[in-house]
Amino acid sequence: MRTLLLSILAALFLVVPNAAAHTYLDTTNPEDGAIVTEPLQSIELTYAGKIEVGSTFKVISSNGEEIETVSVDLVDGVLTGTFDSPLPNDDYTVEWNSISEDGHPLAGQFSFTVDAPVTEEAVEEEAAEENEEQVEVDETIQTNETETTTADDEEASINTLLYIIAILLLIIIVSIITVARRKNTK
């Protein structure tokens, strides 16, 4: 009996360290449920243990659009994704998929909100974008007007050409009839 108890105890000591060695997501920056009030251009996921290359995450805005990361780096159990520019004010969900060092797949998600003050530069960029859109609309209107004017001009030219051809045909017919009558009278 004593041998059996020692065997069970030894097996537990062998199994427990392996179970405790599993990697898990320890912290995130920004934290789950956080309201970020500063411009945010990177996201960090810190794991309690090592994870394998190929671990990744994606950031999804409130309208379901995936925000493209410029790079995703893995250094000492910290997975960092950076963006071209700070994330616009919105609600975001981060869906992550990782592989622990012992090969176990890990997955989960967390959410946060960006509510950073809009800088004058951002307002100027929005105004520039609106101006570009207005220029495109104006160019489209101008192109349509030009196409309409061109079509009207072409139609008028064709009508004028038809009138000239009709008059020439009439002159030719009258000339032929006149010449034929003169020949008949001689």
Image (cartoon, helix red, strand yellow):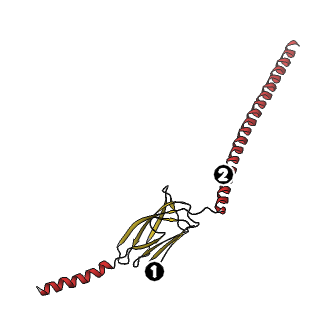
Front residue of 98/115: it is 115
Kind of residue at disc 2: Glu
Residue lying furthest left in this view? Answer: 1
Q: Image point 67% across, 56% down: which residue? A: 127
Label ID, residue 47? none
Secondary structure type for disc 2: helix
The x, y position of residue 31, in whole percent, is: 46, 69
Quarter of the image with the C terminus is top right
Q: Image point 45% across, 67% down: which residue? A: 57
The number of numbered badges drawn on the structure is 2
Label ID, residue 76? 1
Kind of residue at disc 1: Asp
For label 2, the residue is 133
Front residue of 147/121: it is 121
The x, y position of residue 106, in whole percent, is: 37, 70
Decide: is 171 above or below 123: above
Name the image quarter holding residue 124. Answer: bottom right
Q: Image point 41% across, 71% down: which residue? A: 98
The x, y position of residue 111, in whole percent, is: 45, 63
Using the numbered discs, state the Cα–Cα distance from disc 2 to disc 1 in whole angstroms: 46 Å
Q: In this view, does 135 lie to the left or right of 76?
A: right
Q: Residues within 10 Å of mark 1 (few under 14, many from 20)?
A: few
Residue lying furthest right in this view? Answer: 186
Front residue of 117/184: it is 117
Secondary structure type for disc 1: loop
Whichever of callouts 2 and 1 sits on the residue coming sooner in the sequence is 1
